[in-house]
Image (cartoon, helix red, strand yellow):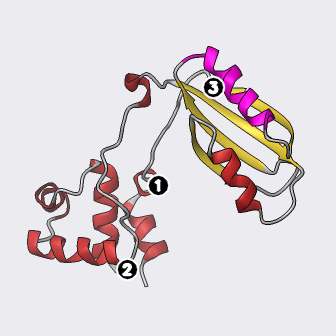
Amino acid sequence: MDERDVRLVKAISDLGTGSPERLHEETGIPVSTIHYRLNNLREAGVIENDLYDLDHEALGLGVTVIVEVLADYEGPYDEFADELLAVEGVTEAFFTMGETDFVVLARLSSSDTVERLISDFEAIPEVERTNSTFTIATLRDEPRAPATYELETLVQELTD
């Protein structure tokens, strides 16, 4: 990636859109160049999709629970992880090092559904224990990491 690519990625993250016209307004890069570079970024796997972001609270899935999962499983971790990912409401899952094997984030419709979530995890035979944290307020829920950086930092760290 060069500086123009980084500027585009930053603008996409800040604006929440891949509209070439909006990106041109933000970056000053010609629209034809933006089309070309967006295609290259898609081919390189940097841009994964063109989905709209959702406001989980407005949608009715405003209860966020962070669950630490301690497990005793055999075989590759990703096979066991598939069981965790199959639980309804799980939006993110991480394989971790340390005392906790997995950290799972779930978006739920109400506090009543937290019990169902934990029961579903504990029904998995390899799960030894869970530790749940009920969030009180969302301070940041940014799906696009570049939006949390200054452009100069991104250019310095990501360009060849």
Q: Which residue is mark 3?
A: 135
In this view of the protein, which residue sits in the foreground, 97 or 129? Answer: 129
Q: Residue at point 62% right, 39% down?
A: 105
Q: Nearer the viewer, mark 2 or mark 3?
A: 3
Query: Which amino acid is tagged 2?
Result: Met
| Viewer-nearest of discs 1 and 3 | 3
The quadrant where residue 44 appears: bottom left
Magenta stretch holds residue 119? yes
Q: Which residue is mark 2?
A: 1
Q: Residue at x 48, y 26 (%)?
A: 61
Tell me where residue 80 appears, x and y as whole percent: 75, 55
How many numbered tags mark residues here? 3
What's the magenta region?
110-123
Seen in the image, is 144 located left or right of residue 36?
Answer: right
Please, what is the three-letter code of the amino acid marked with disc 1? Answer: Ala
Residue sitting at 35 percent across and 42 percent down? Answer: 53
Q: Is residue 86 left or right of residue 156?
A: right
- Are there few (<14), some (14-19), or many (20+) residues within 10 Å of tag 2? some
Residue hosting label 1:
145
Residue toward you, 44 or 108:
108
Q: Is residue 145 above or below residue 92?
A: below
The residue depicted at 72 percent of the width and 32 percent of the height is 120
Give the percent coordinates (x, y) of residue 21. 10, 58
Give the residue at the far bottom of this rendering: 160
Q: Which numbered disc, 1 or 3, marks the residue that appears first in the sequence? A: 3
Image x and y of residue 130, in percent: 82, 35
- Using the numbered discs, state the Cα–Cα distance from disc 1 to disc 3 in whole angstroms: 21 Å
- Left or right: residue 131 versus residue 33 is right
Q: Secondary structure at mark 1?
A: helix
Whether pointer 1 and pointer 2 mark residues with C-beta atoms closer than 8 Å, the reply is no
Magenta segment includes 73: no
